[in-house]
Image: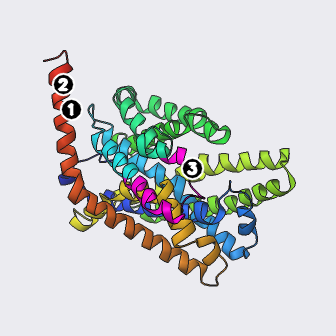
């Protein structure tokens, strides 16, 4: 996910990466920790909480789609004028965390802590084929997006402003909103293409951004609040359908809410916060850049089968220990911060101890392979 080299990183964008990953972790606290929409009986527990606790949980949820959108936009912003890319770091990092979490599982398996939550088949996929196995959807979509980026860049850069924004509108409707509502096998990639294009527009289409920071904040708050309130309604309908059986009316309402949230509020949040951070003048701060370099590792570790299970269901057990507490919001914010720090520290160690060595070994293997088998000498 390094779209720009370390020496050229501007800390305003690195700060945006940190923000994006924080709100993704916050979303997973709500969706994987509390709601667990597709686990039998779990959503009933969400419905038994107070209105304020249910609303607070739903207030965390927009961070997932918004944070992912920001990362895709960052990729488009920095990759739109490039014709070359490298997947090596991303692939090696996925392999590392696939093996790392697999080792944790093996260590804890005799104790019986993880057995009831994790299927061995899914764990093998995450360990052996971490990029394409489906355990993490985002790396798969990200890698595919980078592979097609030279062609996409050539197409986008060949359009005038009218053609560009016309394509963006068609892309938004047909290849983003419709797949998000109806589902599909390539939804992650289609989402990536839309926000990549949106990010590239900020870089290449000379959009005026100065002196509008208050407007960006207001738009972000509107989008986030709107998404949260509609998510509350969506979750309540889903819970009722699970209890009483699916209804056509409930399904249609949920589809409509998904279309509004994903199609309107997520782009509004992502675009407004992106443009806000772009206007910040913070120079280059080593601490911010170092912490931002760990964001992909934070994602892979906390959202892995093993990491997610340990954090949400075992170590913190947020649904049982925190959700019904009067201090729930404070506990939630503290837990999100702790998980982010733990994952960042682990990834910082990976960067210092493993990454350089792994890159050196991988590059040597690739060079030897080319010398032996490539027809281009």
Circle 2/circle 1 CB separation < 8 Å: yes
Residue furthest toward the bottom? 326
Residue 138 spot, x, y in % from top left: 46, 45
> Element at badge 2?
helix
Give the Cα separation between the discs numbered 2 and 3.
38 Å
> Element at badge 1?
helix
Label 3 belongs to which residue? 119
Give the camera-side residue of 294 and 114: 114
> Element at badge 3?
loop
Q: How many marks?
A: 3
Magenta-span inclusion, residue 256: no
Tag 1: Cα neighbours inside 10 Å, few (<14), some, or many (≥20)?
few
Q: Is residue 207 left or right of residue 88?
A: right
Residue 241 spot, x, y in % from top left: 81, 53
Q: Residue at x 16, y 21 (%)?
A: 372
Residue 351 spot, x, y in % from top left: 25, 57
Give the Cα separation between the discs numbered 2 and 1.
6 Å
Q: Which residues are magenta?
A: 100-123
Label 1 belongs to which residue? 366
Magenta-span inclusion, residue 105: yes
């Amino acid at each position: 996910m390094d779209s720009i080299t370390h020496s050229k990183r501007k800390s305003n964008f690195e700060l945006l990466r940190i923000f994006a990953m924080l709100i993704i972790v916050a979303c997973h606290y709500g969706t994987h920790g509390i709601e667990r929409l597709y686990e039998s009986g779990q959503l009933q527990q969400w419905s038994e909480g107070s209105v304020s606790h249910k609303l607070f949980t739903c207030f965390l949820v927009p961070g997932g789609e918004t944070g992912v959108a920001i990362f895709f936009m960052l990729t488009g912003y920095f990759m739109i004028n490039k014709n070359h890319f490298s997947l090596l770091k991303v692939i090696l990092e996925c392999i590392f965390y696939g093996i790392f979490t697999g080792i944790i599982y093996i260590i804890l398996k005799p104790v019986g802590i993880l057995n009831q939550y994790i299927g061995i088949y899914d764990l093998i996929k995450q360990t052996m084929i971490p990029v394409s196995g489906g355990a993490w959807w985002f790396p798969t979509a990200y890698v595919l997006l980078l592979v097609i980026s030279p062609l996409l860049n050539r197409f986008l850069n060949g359009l005038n402003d009218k053609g560009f924004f016309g394509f963006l509108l068609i892309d938004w409707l047909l290849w983003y909103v419709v797949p998000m509502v109806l589902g599909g096998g390539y939804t992650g990639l289609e989402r990536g293409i839309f926000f990549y294009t949106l990010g590239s527009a900020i870089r290449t289409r000379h959009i005026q951004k100065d002196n509008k920071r208050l407007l960006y904040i207001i738009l972000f708050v509107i989008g986030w609040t709107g998404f949260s309130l509609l998510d509350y309604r969506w979750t309540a309908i889903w819970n009722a359908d699970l209890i009483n059986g699916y209804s056509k009316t409930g399904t249609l309402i949920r589809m409509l809410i998904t279309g509004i949230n994903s199609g309107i509020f997520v782009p509004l949040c992502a675009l407004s916060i992106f443009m806000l951070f772009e206007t910040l003048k913070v120079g280059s701060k080593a601490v911010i850049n170092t912490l931002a370099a760990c964001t992909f590792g934070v994602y892979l570790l906390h959202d892995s089968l093993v990491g997610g299970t340990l954090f949400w269901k075992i170590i913190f057990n947020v649904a049982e220990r925190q959700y019904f507490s009067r201090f729930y919001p404070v506990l939630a914010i503290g837990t999100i911060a702790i998980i982010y720090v733990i994952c960042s520290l682990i990834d910082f160690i990976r960067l210092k101890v493993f990454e350089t060595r792994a890159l050196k070994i991988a590059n040597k293997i690739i060079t030897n392979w080319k010398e032996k088998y490539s027809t281009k000498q």
